[in-house]
Amino acid sequence: MHLALDAARLAELPLIVGGQVYRYQWHERYFSEEILPRLDRRRRFLGPLGFVRKRRFLNAARCLVVPSLAAETSSLVAMEALACGTPVVAFPNGALPDVIEHGRTGFLVNDVAEMADAMIAARTLDPEECRAAARKRFSLDRMVAEYLDVYRALARTGRRETGPVAAM
């Protein structure tokens, strides 16, 4: 989050951060050393957001910034943002390049300066394109159909295996 706050300051944009500060020493230290010093009148921390509040928050945002440096296996909040019509700005880590269509539903960036530029440019992206992409790529019907396809393929290949598997 400290990189998102730096990018927002560079872009001269407000940034509202939602999330939980967990009661782990490293998490509390990161928050007090890296987040608190970067907060001001235009860059604020809201704390945890429930479902309804998060949805309102995402609907009202210019963009969602996902400054994760970890190889995320998924980004549910990025998918939720797109469903709300909100573009996503993120580093190309983990599954995020599979969620974001660069220049159409958001921007994949490599550093704080690119993030700042993308946060400004996000207003040029069409919210309906984001919603349409979310419906097409992340709908319940599509995901269920794809899971069923995988299960059918596994069932077909599983019958061709010879010999049992044993564990003791």
Image (cartoon, grey):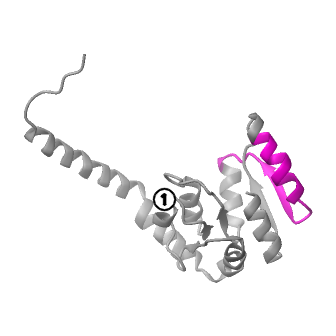
Where does the image place residue 129, in percent across and percent down from the top left? 52, 76
Q: Residue at x 20, y 47 (%)?
A: 152
Q: Residue at x 57, y 60 (%)?
A: 78
Q: Quadrant of residue 93?
A: bottom right
Reading the image, the residue beneath label 1 is 95
Which amino acid lies under the numbered mark 1 shown in the image of this protein? Ala
Q: Between residues 142 and 150, which one lies in front from this camera angle?
A: 150
Where does the image place residue 21, in percent across and percent down from the top left? 76, 42
Q: Residue at x 19, y 22 (%)?
A: 166
Where does the image place residue 48, in percent across and percent down from the top left? 74, 45
**Magenta includes 48?**
yes
Where does the image place residue 151, in percent across and percent down from the top left? 24, 45
| Residues shaded magenta | 27-51
* Residue 33 relative to residue 108: left or right: right
* Residue 3 relative to residue 38: left or right: left
Looking at the rendered image, the quarter that the C terminus falls into is top left
Looking at the image, residue 135 lies above or below residue 76: below
**Magenta includes 79?**
no
Q: Secondary structure at mark 1?
A: loop
Looking at the image, residue 121 lies above or below residue 97: below
Circle 1 crowding by C-alpha within 10 Å: few under 14, some 14–19, many from 20 = few
